[in-house]
Image: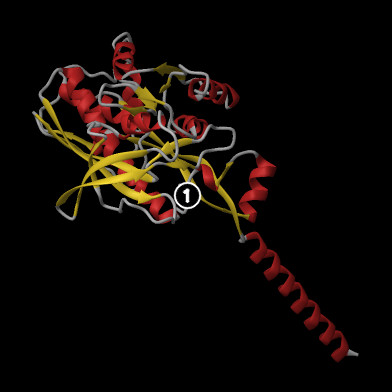
Amino acid sequence: MNFRRWSKQVIGGFIASVVLIVIGATLLIPVPYFVLQPGVAIDVKPLVKVDKETAGEKGTFLLTTISLKEGNVFDYLYAKGSGRVELVPEQQILAENESEEEYQRRQAENMIASQHNAIIAAYREARRPVSVEILGIEVFQLVNNQPHVLQKGDLIKKVDQKLFSSTEKLIQYLSRKKPGDVVTVDLIRNGKRMEKKVKLVALPVSPGQKKRAGLGIVPVPRVEVKTSPPASIETENIGGPSAGLMFSLEVLNQLIPEDLTRGYRIAGTGTISEKGEVGQIGGIQHKIVAAEREEAQIFFCPKDRGPQDTNERMAKETARRIGSKMKIIPVSSLKEAVRYLRTLPVHQAAASFKVKTLT
């Protein structure tokens, strides 16, 4: 009897273990979604260096991030049940046939372009010397597996004899054409200048969007920026273009004699162009939460200007939902953000806040 009882216990324990292993393995099965949730809010000052003595900052500019990772069944169930994290279909994050590693490299390139734009916009706002040499637009990736006239690493100098100062302007030009149209691409490949005839393809788009024509590449701009005094921005494991506005504010603050922070903890997000224009970004609701956790008092967000823009609305809705007292300030340009900051009275209690930086 004891042996039988012992055997039943062993068998029961074995079955229970197998069931737990199966359940655990099932929960870790990947799903075609990425999981987005609040990241961190980081002091920008240690990341920015302008070779010039400054008056010092009594407050803090904070860039905000989101946490993004590939989802599994557990993440999917948690997201559906809790509502605290966001599920985003893979095709909205990754380009066609793009791996997560390639996506991370693309985000790193976007960060470099954002830093260049931030420095250019800040120096122009401060009316300090800055020069920009447009080297071209690099073919960073090919978006499909079909035979391609262009190759990774090609540096595009002209398309149809036209120079383009940014990827946005190239995309805008090509969007007026149709798939199947042929364009002439002047490029440098392995140090050799050449011309190629390229047939435009229909690019993949999100559901409900109109298909547009393109070269079938992921383009990244190549520019050389020179400033006086010299300036640099160094980031660690942060990618994407959305810190542009906050970088630009910090660069500007180190260039001019006044302290734009006025003693406040100022978080924000938004892309920046060379002209200082602020653009929409993704995941702003998570950035509001990240800023609230770091006790930010002001949050700059991109202003909604078109029917598809949602940053301003979502930022205000999220702040209300979580009971935040942060002032949500929508801006469409660096100049608007600076104008707002100059209206603020100096905040005397700034020293009571603990400032967190990268370690």
In the image, is residue 292 above or below residue 339? Answer: below
Q: Is residue 22 left or right of residue 68?
A: right
Task: Give the residue at x 57% y 27%.
Answer: 322
Q: Specify the amino acid type for callout 1.
A: Glu
Where does residue 141 sit, x and y in percent of width and height?
35, 50
Does any portion of residue 351 appear in the rendered image?
yes
Task: Give the residue at x 91% y 90%.
Answer: 1
Residue situated furthest right in the rendering: 1
- In terms of depth relative to the viewer, which is nearer, 352 or 228? 228
- In terms of depth relative to the viewer, which is nearer, 128 or 17? 128
Where does residue 172 sit, x and y in percent of width and height?
37, 29
Residue 146: image quadrant is: bottom left
Tag count? 1
Residue 58: image quadrant is: top left
Query: Dot 1, crowdedness within 10 Å: few (<14), some or many (≥20)?
Result: some
Q: Is residue 327 left or right of residue 237?
A: right
Does any portion of residue 56 appear in the rendered image?
no
Task: Give the residue at x 10% y 29%.
Answer: 52
In the image, is residue 183 above or below residue 2? Answer: above
In the image, is residue 22 above or below residue 284? Answer: below
Where does residue 36 sit, x and y in percent of width and height?
52, 42
Q: Which residue is mark 1?
A: 96
Where does residue 191 sit, x and y in percent of width and height?
14, 53
Residue 260: image quadrant is: top left
Secondary structure beneath label 1? loop
